[in-house]
Each structure stands twice: as C-alpha cells, then as structure tokens.
C-alpha cells in the first residue's frame, strides 16, 4: 500500500517543523535548559534533513531508510527529554516536546520510505 507522504513532502515537513522548533523557545518562553534542548534538536535534525537522500536535501548522503530509523528513534526519545533534561515542570516546553513526538510519529508512519522508481522507456 502506498503511503500518502512522499519523500519530498516529508522533507518539506521536516524543514517546516524545525523552523517552528527554532522559533518555539522565544515564542513560548522556554527555560534555558528547554531552549538548549530544542536548539540542539533543531540543529541536528536540520543537518540530517540537509543530508538525507530526498529531493529537498542539500547533499544526498544519508539513505532515506536511515532517516526513517532516526525518526523512529526520535519518536521514542522526544517524550522523555523534558524529564531527562529537567524541564518537565515547564508546561509549554514539555507540551511542545510531546506535540513534536506526535507529529514525528504520525509523519513517520505515513511516509513512503521505499518510493517506487518511475520507469521511462524500460529504464529505472
């Protein structure tokens, strides 16, 4: 079954979500520890997105399936960060990370990680 999110759309969602993550600490008035966790996440994820083998990449060095595995790992890790880093009492930051978990897992589940190559005149 083909999934509704193509690699191109996934990349666009990645960049948009990380732009929101970069703005969130100031807009939502995060504590220093929450802001640093958010900025670190955004920087790392922007680097991953820029290097993933999908059309919005700057350089296609990371296989799409590795990106998908990283998304799954993030989906498990993100909801724990407020408690691990120590900002779980900050409702806005905590809820931002929980919402980001939901977005990450939904987009990951709906992404076509093995896009079919179009065949033109018998070529792959």
Image (cartoon, rainbow, N blue to C red):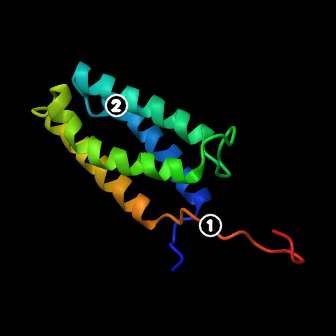
Task: Report whether 56 appears left or right of 1.
Answer: right
In the foreground, 60 or 82:
60
Neighbours of disc 2 within 10 Å: few (<14), some (14-19), many (20+)? many
Task: Residue 76: give x, y in percent of width and height.
Answer: 28, 48
Residue 41 appears in which quarter of the rendering? top left
Work out whether 109 lies above or below 87.
Answer: below
Task: Residue 13: give x, y in percent of width and height.
Answer: 50, 52
Q: Mark 1, mark 2: which one is toward the viewer? A: 1
Q: Secondary structure at mark 1?
A: loop
Residue 105 appears in which quarter of the rendering? bottom left
Q: CA distance from mark 1 to mark 2?
A: 31 Å
Image mark count? 2
- Residue at mark 2: 38
Numbered label attached to residue 115: 1
Neighbours of disc 1 within 10 Å: few (<14), some (14-19), many (20+)? few
Q: Secondary structure at mark 2?
A: helix
Task: Report whether 76 appears left or right of 50.
Answer: left
Question: At 27% from the left edge and 50% from the top edge, which residue is drawn?
Answer: 99
Work out whether 7 lies above or below 59.
Answer: below
Residue 58 appears in which quarter of the rendering? top right
Work out whether 93 lies above or below 118.
Answer: above
Question: At 68% from the left edge and 43% from the top edge, which residue is drawn?
Answer: 60
Task: Residue 117: give x, y in percent of width and height.
Answer: 72, 69
Q: Earlier in the sequence, mark 1 or mark 2?
A: 2
Task: Report whether 98 appears left or right of 110.
Answer: left
Q: Residue furthest left?
A: 89
Task: Residue 56: give x, y in percent of width and height.
Answer: 65, 48
Numbered label attached to residue 65: none
């Amino acid at each position: 079954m083909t999934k509704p999110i193509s690699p191109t759309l996934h990349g666009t969602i990645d960049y948009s979500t990380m732009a929101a993550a970069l703005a969130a600490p100031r807009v939502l008035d995060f504590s220093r520890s929450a802001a640093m966790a958010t900025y670190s996440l955004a920087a790392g994820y922007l680097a991953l997105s820029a290097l993933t083998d999908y059309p919005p990449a700057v350089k296609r060095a990371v296989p799409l399936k590795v990106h998908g595995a990283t998304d799954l790992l993030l989906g498990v890790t993100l909801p724990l960060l407020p408690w691990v880093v120590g900002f779980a009492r900050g409702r806005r930051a905590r809820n931002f990370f929980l919402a980001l978990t939901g977005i990450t897992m939904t987009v990951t589940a709906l992404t076509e990680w093995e896009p079919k190559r179009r065949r033109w005149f018998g070529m792959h």
